[in-house]
Amino acid sequence: MISWFDDAQDEDDEFIEAAKAIRLLALDVDGVLTDGTIYIAADGECFKGFNAKDGMGISCALHNGLEVAIITGRKSEIIHRRAEELGITTIIEGAKDKREALRSLRRLRGLSVEEVAYVGDDLNDLPAFAESGLTFAPDDAAEDVYDAADIGLDNPGGRGAVREAIEYILAAQDKWEKIVASYEQAGQGDRQ
């Protein structure tokens, strides 16, 4: 099993227990799935970079019973393109109130607050924390958000933070070690 998770078990029993109940992981985009940088060309087209390790983590989550959703305040075709590549089918764009967006999604899925986790990096993500049983913030999140999160991640946004959160949840659910073993034995899978 992953060594940081063993260390976490000694210190965060409450959060390990919370992670066992998670069925839905909701993600912000800018600063979580990306490093927060937005490139805008002269014609107005936007560009963002996504991390392959985060993509592989999302693929592992989806194939092991953990639904992944995107909740973002922006609207972008780039988000749809990446979500489609990864198999994410739930995208809520233009969310001015992320708490209400997450509450609506949670109710639509018939989930309790305790079955939802959220990864956010900035002040507009704080309302969604109140609608989540377990919250994560990337290493480079705004200080107030990092402090408010149940778990401050070691990786920055767009550089493995999502993967780390997924590994935490799946390890708590006794799934991560089996996922790793399946890749070691079969040599299967593509990088995302």
Image (cartoon, rainbow, N blue to C red):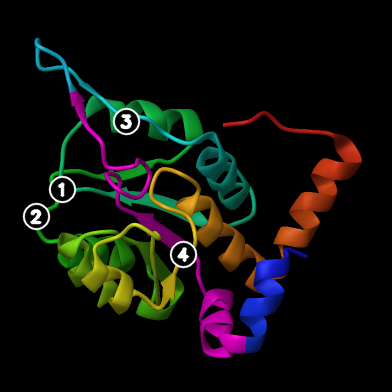
- Identity of the residue drawn at 49% across and 35% down: 86
In whole angstroms, how far apart are the C-alphas of marks 4 and 3?
26 Å
In front of the other: 185 or 144: 144
Q: Quadrant of residue 133?
A: bottom left
Which numbered marker is on residue 80? 3
User: In the rendered structure, are the residues bearing label 2 and label 1 in contact, judged by CB atoms less than 8 Å apart?
Assistant: yes
176 lies above or below 185: below
Q: Earlier in the sequence, mark 1 or mark 4?
A: 1
- The kind of residue tagged 3 is His
- Residue identified by numbered label 2: 96
Residue most extreme to the right = 185
Q: Is residue 92 above or below residue 187?
A: below
Q: Residue at x 48, y 55 (%)?
A: 155
Question: Is 26 included in the stretch rendered in magenta?
Answer: yes
142 sits to left or right of 12: left
Which label was assigned to residue 93? none
The amino acid type found where label 1 is placed reads Gly
- Looking at the image, is mark 2 or mark 1 earlier in the sequence? 1
- The residue where tag 1 is placed is 73
Quadrant, the N terminus: bottom right
User: For residue 153, which numbered disc appears in the image?
Assistant: 4
Pair 4/3: label in front: 4
The span shown in magenta is 11-39
User: Alpha carbon of mark 1 to alpha carbon of mark 4: how far?
Assistant: 22 Å
Q: Nearer the viewer, residue 113 or 145?
A: 145
Measured in 3D between alpha carbons, the distance from the residue under mark 2 to the one under mark 1, in whole angstroms, is 6 Å
User: Measured along the vertical axis of the image, is residue 2 above or below residue 52?
Assistant: below
Q: Position of residue 184 (x, y in %)?
A: 86, 43
Between label 1 and label 4, give the one nearer the viewer.
Answer: 4
Q: Residue at x 25, y 36 (%)?
A: 37
Q: Residue furthest top?
A: 43
Query: Mark 2 packing: few (<14 Cα in 10 Å), some, or many (20+)?
Result: few
